[in-house]
Image (spheres, grey):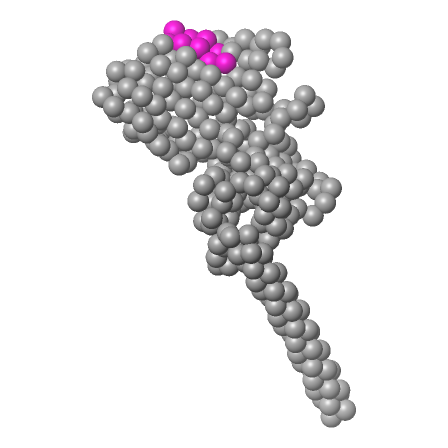
Amino acid sequence: MEGYRLKNIIISILVLLNGCLLLSLWNWISAEHSAQQQVTEQLVALFAADGVSLDPDIIPSQSPPASLTLTRDDAQERELASYFLGNGLSRSELSGGVQTYDGSDGAAVFQADGSFEISAGYLPVEDPEAFCADFCRQFGYQDLTFSLEDGSGSAAAVQYFDGFPVINATVTFSFDAGTLVTVTGTHLPETVQPVSPSSQPLSAAAALNAFLSARRETGAVVRSVLAVDLCYELQSSTAVPMTLTPSWRISTDTVTYHVDCITGAVTHG
C-alpha cells in the first residue's frame, strides 16, 4: 500500500512539473509574440512617418540561413558542358583556376568563381523554350524568362540554392534563327561547408530598419514596400572564390533592394 501511495505521489509531482513547464513555455511564446508585434507596429509607424507604406503581414518571422562556402566540382562542370557540347570532351587547365572543355560542337570555359561561358557553335534547337526549361530543371535554375522572336533573342534564369534564389547567379541563353549561339552565367557546385557566423544575422525587422536609414541618407523615392523575402548573394575573393551570404530582398514600387544579413550593407538593383 505504501508503495502504491508513493507511486501516485511521484506521478502527481511529475504532472505538476510538466504543467509548470508548459505554462512557462506558453508565457515565453506569448511574450516573444508580443515583442515581435510591438516591433512590427513600430516599424510600420516609422515607415509611415517617411511616407512609405509597409504592410505588417509581409514582414517574415523566419531566420536567415547560414553563410556557405562552396567547393568547386569538376564533374559537375563537365556535366554542364556536356549538356550543350556532347560527350567526349577534352579538358584543359589554365592559370588562375580556368578550366576549358573542348569538343567538335564548341567549347566551354569555367572560372574559379563559378562563372562560365559556352560557345555552342550554332547548335540547332527546335524548341528553345523547352530546351531552356529542361536545362533549368536539371541544373537548379528557376524564374525562366524569354525574349524571343522567330527563334532569335535570349532567355534567362536564376539559380536557386537550398530553396533560396541566388540574386547574382544567373544563366543567359542567346539564340539566332533557331540555333543556340552562346550560354553565359554562373553555376554553383553542391559541395558546401557552413561558415561560423561572427554575429547574429539580421532579422527581417532589422533589415527593414537598415533599409529605411539608407533610404533617408540617399533620398531615394519609395512609396511602398511590396515584398520582403530571403535570398543568397554570391561573393568571391582570392582566398574564397565562392561564398553564399544570406540577404534580405526588399521589393519596392521603384527598385529592389538587398540588405546583407551579416554586414547590414544595403544595395539596390
Q: Is residue 177 magenta?
A: no
Q: Nearer the viewer, residue 255 or 11?
A: 255
The percent position of residue 103, horizontal first and vertical second, equals: 42, 8
108 drawn magenta: yes
Q: Is residue 63 above or below residue 98?
A: below
Q: Is residue 192 visible?
A: no
225 or 136: nearer the eye? 225
Residue furthest top as drawn: 104
Q: Residue at x 62, y 70 (%)?
A: 30
Q: Main secondary structure of the magenta part?
A: strand
In the depicted view, which residue is nearer to us: 40 or 239? 40
What is the residue that sits farthest to the left in this orientation? 150
Residue 163 percent location from the top left of the image: 49, 42
Left-right relation of 145 to 228: left
Q: Is residue 149 left or right of residue 218?
A: left
Measuring from the top left, give residue 151's x and y in whole percent: 25, 21
Residue furthest to the bottom in view is 1
**Drawn side of residue 41 relative to residue 21, left or right:** left
Quick one: 75 or 241, which is closer to the camera? Answer: 241
Q: Quadrant of the N terminus?
A: bottom right
Which residue is depicted at the point 35% across and 14% down? Answer: 181
- Residue visible at 61% across and 29% down in the picture: 235
Q: State how many labels appear.
A: 0
Stretch in magenta = 101-109
Picture coordinates of residue 106, whole percent (x, y): 40, 9
Quarter location, residue 243: top right
